[in-house]
Amino acid sequence: MVKTLKIILAITLLYIVFLVVLFPARFATAMLQEMNAIPPVIKLGNVSGSIWNGKLSTASYQGIALDSINWQLSPFSMLTGTMLVDFKAGSRRSDIKAKGQVAFNSEGLAANNLSLKAPLTAILQHYPLPYGLTSTGHLDLSIAHFQQDKPWCESLDGVVKANDLLIKSAFGQLAVDNVSAKLACPNGVLTAYMQLSTNSLGINGNVQLTKTRQYILDANVKPPSNATQDYINVLKFSGSPNSQGQYVFKYSGKL
């Protein structure tokens, strides 16, 4: 009798292990959506595979979409109360590509070694530039570390760069050699810093995203000595330079 019970118990435990290991990812995502753990604004495509090693055809937010998403969930991380996920999104033909590691625990969302590459046109059609400017090129985002907190983050160490940048306006167009911004999170406010040493446009300042989703630009621009006339014409459109030859930009809006 005891031997029979042991066999039944072993079979039951083995069955439970197989259920956990092979639990379909589509059931898990459906459960998360019903619990509102996945915001309705995030649209998911077809889900396949298991919760530990799954695939998602597409995921989109406000028109910006990732495709060919693959993830791996570490079962050992669950023992420490953290859900640790390595993911990769995008194929050779995809406009937007991303990869990295994200973690979920009682403190919120964290990310490490996160990278994202996307054409600027895919971003700017939803978040246009001020003053009627348009631009083409590629965005390259790298985040060494991010920890979520209110209103946005507790800590952030990242860099965003624009490659092959071409800015267009009513006065002409401008090809930019290099431009990048340092990303940080002082006092929980998401902030991008631009310094003269990190761009060829003569920009010095920052952009902040407040808890009310207001973005605030506070910067000054002093065109370099090799600036083209088209660039100077664009700057003149914003007003006259100050006594130090700087054009001051203060702009705010809401996402």
Image (cartoon, rainbow, N blue to C red):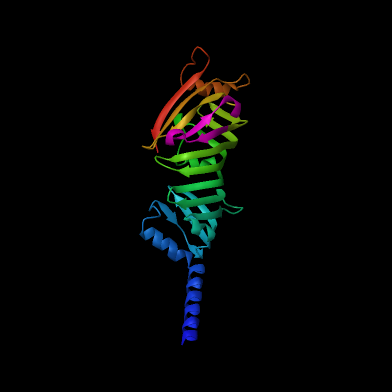
Say above or below: 21 vs 96.
below
User: Which of the pair 167/56 is nearer the observer?
Assistant: 56
Residue 37 lies in magenta, yes or no? no
* Residue 57 visible somewhere in the drawing: no
User: Which of the pair 168/26 is nearer the observer?
Assistant: 26
Q: Quadrant of the C terminus?
A: top left
Q: Residue at x 46, y 24 (%)?
A: 249
Q: Position of residue 8 (x, y in %)?
A: 47, 82
* Residue 246 visible somewhere in the drawing: yes
* Residue 194 horizontal side relative to residue 30, left or right: right
Say above or below: 148 vs 131.
below
Q: Residue at x 54, y 33 (%)?
A: 182
Q: Which residues are magenta?
A: 180-198
Say above or below: 26 vs 195.
below
Residue 197 lies in magenta, yes or no? yes
Residue found at the far bottom of this picture? 1
How many numbered badges does the structure rendering display? 0
Q: Position of residue 56 (x, y in %)?
A: 50, 59
Q: Residue at x 56, y 26 (%)?
A: 195
